[in-house]
Image (tube, rainbow, N blue to C red):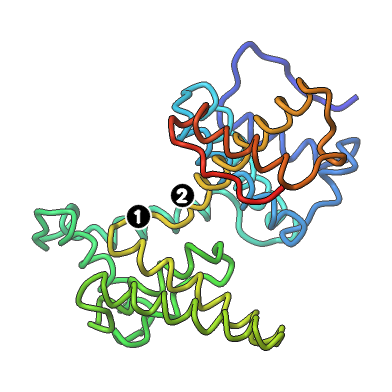
């Protein structure tokens, strides 16, 4: 048994030591095996679970998920420290210095009275730190972002230097154009072209959302949630009829699925036009 003090309440220093214990002699075989690379997916997943907790509006759930996300930071710091690299204090030191440097309106003589001015200063300082011109700002967009979020960041960067439609009508025309090109690829049975045009359709759809200051990732999550609610309704009502989904025709399933629009969201179901 490892040396560990059980307490009624633990603090941050306990959390740091706990990860060291889990990765140390007599610790957990899974924790000991982990690397920066093996934990990459976990960090992304935990961040999105924090977002889910925020959307849920539950303080208790948010507290739990923030703990899981904080564990990822401590875990990576522990792995690095074991190999003679940075530790959590080094992470804190760099983060504090960056925040102080990028808030000259708080810690210096720069004037910024609005959130927009703050963001403009932040971007300018970041570009200067990276030795980038305005045109080179695209280099600061992480490749590991979810696709829709990355698309939005790219488009926002382009818009800042004036490479943008004057209003949403241009974005909508582009979306229609890309849908037409997708249809041409489908008609031709050209899978490579279909892949390319589908990507262009998604990219163009994100651009439309951007004009209304809508978060495309949130929109996609909402669409997924809506589908899951309706599909759960379909499963439940099929079971009430003594039916299994795999034994039903598409028409039968669609009829119940469309009824969910009315029962769950107060919308008139779209008429089913096939058997």
> Is 52 in front, or is 99?
52
Residue at position x 25%, y 76% in the image: 160
The reply, left or right, for residue 213 in relation to residue 113 is right
Q: Secondary structure at mark 1?
A: loop
Q: In the displayed structure, does residue 27 sit left or right of residue 135?
A: right
Q: Counting other residues with Cα less than 10 Å from the Cα at mark 1, is it few (<14), some (14-19), or many (20 or more)?
A: some
Percent position (x, y) of residue 77?
64, 51
Residue of label 2: 218
Q: Position of residue 197 (x, y in %)?
A: 56, 81
Quick check: 172 left or right of 17? left
Q: Are marks 1 and 2 in contact (CB under 8 Å)?
A: yes
Q: Residue at x 51, y 44 (%)?
A: 270
Where disc 2 sits, the SS reads helix
Q: Position of residue 261 (x, y in %)?
A: 52, 36
Answer with the quarter of the image where residue 226 lies.
Answer: top right
Residue 219, how many percent across, how many down? 45, 51
Classify mark 2: residues with Cα within 10 Å, few (<14), some (14-19) or many (20+).
Answer: some
Query: Is 84 located above or below residue 5 in the figure?
Result: below
Left or right of residue 236: residue 69: left
Q: CA distance from mark 1 to mark 2?
A: 8 Å
Camera-nearest residue between 178 and 6: 178
Please name the residue that numbered disc 1 is placed on: 214
Residue in front for this viewpoint, 17 or 204 = 204
């Amino acid at each position: 048994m490892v040396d560990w003090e059980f307490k009624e309440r633990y603090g941050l220093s306990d959390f740091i030591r706990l990860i060291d214990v889990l990765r140390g002699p007599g610790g957990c075989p899974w924790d000991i095996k982990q690397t920066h690379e093996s934990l990459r997916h976990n960090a992304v997943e935990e961040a999105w679970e924090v977002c889910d907790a925020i959307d849920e509006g539950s303080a208790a759930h948010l507290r739990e998920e923030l703990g899981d996300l904080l564990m990822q930071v401590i875990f990576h710091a522990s792995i690095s420290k074991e190999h003679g690299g940075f530790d959590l204090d080094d992470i804190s030191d760099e983060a504090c210095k960056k925040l102080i440097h990028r808030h000259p309106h708080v810690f210096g003589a720069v004037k910024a009275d609005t959130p927009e001015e703050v963001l403009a200063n932040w971007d300018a300082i970041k570009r200067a730190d990276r030795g980038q011109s305005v045109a080179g700002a695209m280099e600061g967009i992480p490749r590991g972002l979810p696709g829709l979020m990355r698309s939005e960041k790219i488009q926002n960067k382009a818009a800042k230097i004036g490479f943008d439609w004057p209003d949403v009508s241009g974005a909508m025309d582009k979306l229609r154009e890309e849908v037409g090109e997708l249809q041409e690829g489908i008609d031709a049975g050209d899978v490579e072209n279909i892949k390319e045009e589908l990507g262009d359709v998604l990219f163009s759809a994100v651009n439309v959302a951007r004009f209304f200051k809508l978060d495309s990732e949130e929109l996609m999550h909402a669409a997924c949630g809506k589908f899951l609610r309706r599909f759960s309704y379909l499963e439940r009502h099929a079971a009430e009829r003594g039916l299994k989904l795999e034994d039903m025709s598409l028409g039968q399933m669609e009829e119940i699925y469309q009824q969910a629009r009315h029962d769950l969201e107060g919308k008139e179901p779209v008429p089913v036009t096939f058997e």
